[in-house]
Amino acid sequence: MKAKIIITPKKAVLDPQGKTVKNALAHLGYTGVSDVHVGKYIEIDLDPAADRETARQTLADACHKFLSNPIIEDYRLELE
Amino acid sequence: MHFAVLQFPASNCDQDAVYALRRLGHTAELVWHKVATLEQAAAVIVPGGFSYGDYLRTGAIARFSPVMQALQTFAANGGLVLGICNGFQILCEAHLLPGALVRNRSLQFRCEQIFLRTATGDSPFTCRIPADRPLRLPVAHGEGCYYADDATLTELAANHQILWQYCDARGELTDDASPNGSLRNIAGICNAQRNVAGLMPHPERACEPLLGSEDGCLIFASMIHTLERRAAGLGSPSR
């Protein structure tokens, strides 16, 4: 079982990386880009025999306390 | 007074802090991050650096060190704690201070001299700083842009928890004076109890004439003055 965690800056927080990438895309001629947000991607391998719901709760706790900072970031947790 | 200066893997301003405090005539010792007690210390400095390589987020891993659990108790008991640069980031991650430090608005690592306005003398960290005297201190960081939501900012201002703000040489708070784009030009804050503070600039690197400024001494002198008053059974001082 694998967990995929996508962490993005909160909308209210300045994202100078996203803004710079957006400007660079425009300079390179890629049109139609209305906004860019740069975040993080974390992949976690889990014991295949682990209970799915328990794993989700454990990882959600880890995301909230450690893997993301809720003051400045949002996270999305996917299990596959 | 005896200071503990915490030491994490990749702290790099720890020795500077010890040097500055000893130069002021006080004792200071390095305390390794795996040590789980701070009983000997009158005050604690969380120094600058790149603890744990700044992996995940600045300060995110350091905050779970055994010494940080001891620091939570030390702070809860009213002990004075000053976080400098990475130390400020660690204190925010540990929720000892509100808000967070994010990437500089310019995306640049900024290493330069700045001016600081001391917003209030009513704290153990600012009580010996003359009013209306901009401090000349160095900064060296890539992630020093202070962020907190509107409600937190309003509370910080109302409680006079904003201790230092970036200003120009005349003491004016301008956008150009800020090296990182912090909200409200915030360079340093304290907690509601006023015994824990953090700032991005480096007072320990401005403690002797050879370094171009001695203004950093005023921050340590404020802490020392507070500790001496406490030891004498007097209340907290103010400017």
Image (cartoon, grey):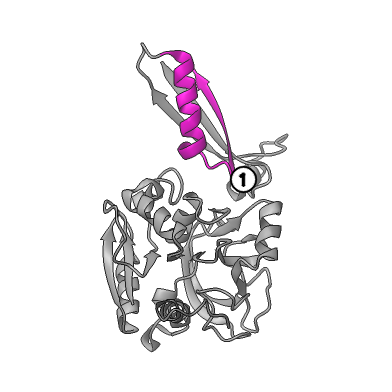
Label 1 element class: helix
Left or right of A50? Residue A18 is: right
Q: Quadrant of residue B114?
A: bottom right
Magenta highlight on residue A57: yes
- Quadrant placement of the N terminus of chain B: bottom left
| Left or right: B137 as drawn, with respect to A9 | left
Residue B206 x, y percent position in the rendering = 42, 79
**Looking at the image, is B21 positioned above or below residue B5?**
below
Find the residue positioned furthest to the bottom: B209
Percent across and percent down for residue B109 are 48, 60
Residue in front for this viewpoint, B126 or B16: B126
Q: Quadrant of residue B22?
A: bottom left
Q: Please state, as top left, top right, bottom left or bottom right, where the C terminus of chain B lies in the image.
A: bottom right
In the image, what residue occupies the spot 35% across and 72% down?
B17
Query: Residue B170 colored magenta?
Result: no
In the image as oriented, which residue stretches furthest toward the front?
B233
Inspect this view and state whether residue A41 appears: no
Q: The magenta stretch spans which residues?
A: A51-80
Residue at left 52%, top 21%? Answer: A78
- The residue to which callout 1 is attached is A24
Amino acid of disc 1: Ala
Q: Is residue A69 visible?
A: yes
Label 1: chain letter: A
Crowding near the residue tagged with mark 1, few <14, some 14–19, many ≥20 C-alpha atoms within 10 Å: few
Q: Is residue B116 left or right of residue A65?
A: right
Residue at 37% from the left image edge and 52% from the top image edge: B68
- In the rendered view, would you say A28 is above or below B95? above
